[in-house]
Amino acid sequence: MTQHHGGQRWIAHALPIRTGRVLLLHRNPGGRHGDLWDIPGGSVGPGETPAQAARREVSAETGLDVLIADELTHFVNPDTGDDEVDLQTADTETINTQTNPLQINEVTTVGIHTVTFGCFENRLDRDVSLTPEHCEFEWMSYAEATHVPLVWHVRRTLDHAEALGLLT
């Protein structure tokens, strides 16, 4: 269940990066966002920060132990009630809630916050182990990742990470 904060819903993701490559997870065809490539993530639980939720989701979905780094992207969009995003109305601006925490409180029409953090492995000796939500994984370069079907926010996050020089 997605955590609600003052009427706002928060979903946290992490972009695992290893030597310039990102870990992408292929979602099972019959499930939500079926047959698209995604990154680990899920709902922010009660009492969790988005960064804590992102770390928990990486561990749960991949078995990896990661160090959460800086926030890469933060998208805000209307809550349609079905977890779908209207890309015509989605706000693609990055919001830094640490330097301007009032910015989010001033927004009244926004319902869902999708935040993604960079992350790096604490231990390189662990193999990726998938949950039934995903059918395969691959460490991809930016160029490879831009040629597979991605969940809407993943491409935008990859573009931002590439522009920052994290994927070279």
Image: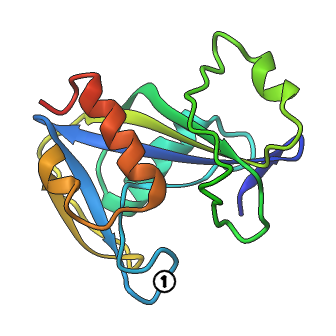
Could you tell me residue 39's position as x and y percent?
37, 55
Q: Is residue 105 left or right of residue 89?
A: right
Could you tell me residue 33's position as x and y percent?
47, 74
Which residue occupies 44% across, 90% down?
30
Res 87 → quadrant = bottom right
Q: Is residue 74 visible?
A: yes
Q: Quadrant of the N terminus?
A: bottom right
Residue sticking out furthest to the top: 99
Residue sticking out furthest to the bottom: 30
Q: Is residue 25 left or right of residue 125?
A: right
Could you tell me residue 118's position as x and y percent?
36, 33
Which residue occupies 48% across, 39% down?
116
Residue under label 1? 31
- Colour scheme shown: rainbow
In this view, the residue in front, 117 or 53, is 117
In this view, the residue in front, 108 or 115, is 108
Which residue occupies 13% across, 55% down?
144
In this view, the residue in front, 90 or 10, is 90
Q: Quadrant of the C terminus?
A: top left
Q: Is residue 40 above or below residue 28?
A: above
Q: Is residue 3 left or right of residue 91?
A: right
The kind of residue on which mark 1 rests is Gly
Could you tell me residue 64's position as x and y percent?
29, 50
Which residue occupies 13% across, 35% down?
20
